[in-house]
Amino acid sequence: MSTEPLFWLSAVAAVLIVGISKGGFGGGLGVVGVPLLAMTTSPQSAAAILLPILIVMDMTGLHGWRGRWDREQLRRLIPAALFGIVLGALSFHLFSEDGIRILIGVIGLVFGTSWWARQLGWLSVLSRPKPGPWHTRGWAAVSGFTSFGVHAGGPPLAVALLPQQLPPDRYAATTVVFFTWVNLSKVVPYYWLDQFSTEILLTAALLAPLGIFAVRLGILVNSIISEVLFYRFCYLFLVLVSARLIFIGLTNVFR
């Protein structure tokens, strides 16, 4: 287990950011966890450390949001995400993590900036129906795939769910249930790929209580802000995190 202060500083920051995002903002900032922690350890170790903590966070969020999730959306999301996880496990050694970062960064950046352009009046707002079930399923599969390697399923899930215009509490609760299934489903392939070690599990156990606190804090914050502000936060986080992912991926590829 690492004794480096910089490692623990980045680990605490990563767990706080991911937990608050999971608890109250639909997990939009969850994608920064692995890149932040990977500044002081390998990306593979960062992902393995965070997975048990994410599961603890999910269980905490389930209790806090019980009964408020959208069952119709989950029936579309979860099977498609499990398909994406299977693809991620089978192709684990074929795709680079930086390639996945760049891909999801581009997706999230295009989606987020187009939303803000419409809100600011830079693009005309067309009246169109909500996306159909295959839109949701397709992006859920992408979310499961990108979540497997670097726990970066947030932007694709936002692409799937935000256009459905769910109330803030239902949106947040639905994302919590979704990622509970996703993260629990990743345990077996992570074990199969030998991602866990005693050191990694001990580090995760020490950080898990902080994750519980962060999720509770996120739920509290969600309950005191308006719906308009909530969606502005979600889309702003989507743009910022996506841009950061592109920067990290391109920097690593061309260095």
Image: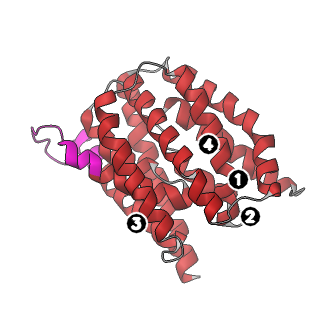
Q: How many marks?
A: 4
Q: Give the residue drawn at x 81%, y 41%.
A: 206
**Which one is in front, 33 or 54?**
54
Query: What residue is pinned by disc 3?
Result: 103
Measured Cα–Cα span from mark 3 to mark 4: 23 Å
N-terminal-most mark, 3 or 4: 4
Q: Would you say 139 lies left or right of 195 here? A: left
Question: SS for tag 3?
Answer: helix
Residue 243 place in picture, x, y as percent: 46, 59
Task: Tell me if label 2 and label 1 are in contact, CB under 8 Å.
Answer: yes
Residue type highlighted by circle 4: Leu
Q: Determine if the magenta segment contains residue 37.
A: no
Which label is found at residue 54? 4
Q: Is residue 101 visible?
A: no
Measured Cα–Cα span from mark 3 to mark 1: 23 Å
- The residue at the far right in this view is 3
Residue 129 place in picture, x, y as percent: 12, 37
- In this view, 166 is above or below 115: above
N-terminal-most mark, 2 or 1: 2
Magenta highlight range: 114-137
Query: What residue is pinned by disc 1?
Result: 49
Dividing the picture into quadrants, the one containing residue 48 is bottom right
- Quadrant of the snapshot with the C terminus: bottom right
N-terminal-most mark, 3 or 1: 1
